[in-house]
């Protein structure tokens, strides 16, 4: 398996948005689940929103995507949202 070359921001401390906290409740996952998802991430790609990235991962044997936005000034990886991917 090819090893991903993650960007510098990948190792920054993470910060949660209020939107993410609401989605965690709606989608039945918690901070521990999210950290595990980030730990098993397989790839990343640019989002349609400039300066945001889509992290590809899994949770409970389903594909998930986590949207992140690196904060260069504060050196924080801001987690915007996370959601399951139901179709290809």
Image: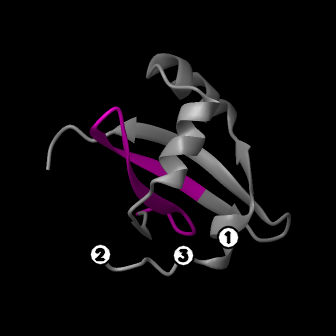
Q: CA distance from mark 2 to mark 1?
A: 23 Å
The residue positioned 58% from the left and 23% from the top of the image is 22
Q: Whole-percent x and y of residue 49?
A: 48, 62
Q: Which mark is residue 33?
A: none
The numbered mark, 3 or 2, whose residue comes first in the sequence reads 2
Q: Whole-percent x and y of residue 11?
A: 69, 66
Is disc 3 in contact with disc 1, using a CB cutoff of under 8 Å?
no
Q: Residues within 10 Å of mark 2 (few under 14, many from 20)?
A: few
Does 61 appear above or below 67? above
Q: Secondary structure at mark 3?
A: loop
The numbered mark, 2 or 1, whose residue comes first in the sequence reads 2
* Residues rendered magenta in the picture: 48-68
> Residue 45 magenta-drawn?
no
Q: Whole-percent x and y of residue 12?
A: 74, 63
- The number of numbered discs placed on residues in the rendered structure image is 3
Q: CA distance from mark 3 to mark 1?
A: 8 Å
- Eye-nearest disc, 2 or 1: 2
Q: Which residue is mark 3?
A: 6
Q: Which residue is mark 2?
A: 1
Q: Residues within 10 Å of mark 1 (few under 14, many from 20)?
A: some
The residue positioned 41% from the left and 63% from the top of the image is 48
The residue positioned 67% from the left and 70% from the top of the image is 9
Q: Which mark is residue 9?
A: 1
């Amino acid at each position: 398996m090819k090893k991903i070359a993650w960007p510098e921001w990948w190792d920054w401390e993470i910060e949660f948005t209020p939107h993410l906290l609401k989605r965690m409740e709606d989608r039945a996952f918690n901070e521990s689940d999210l950290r595990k998802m980030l730990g098993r991430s397989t790839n990343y790609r640019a989002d349609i929103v400039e300066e945001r990235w889509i992290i590809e991962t899994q949770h409970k044997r389903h594909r998930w995507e986590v949207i992140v936005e690196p904060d260069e000034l504060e050196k924080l990886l801001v987690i915007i949202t996370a959601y399951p991917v139901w179709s290809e």
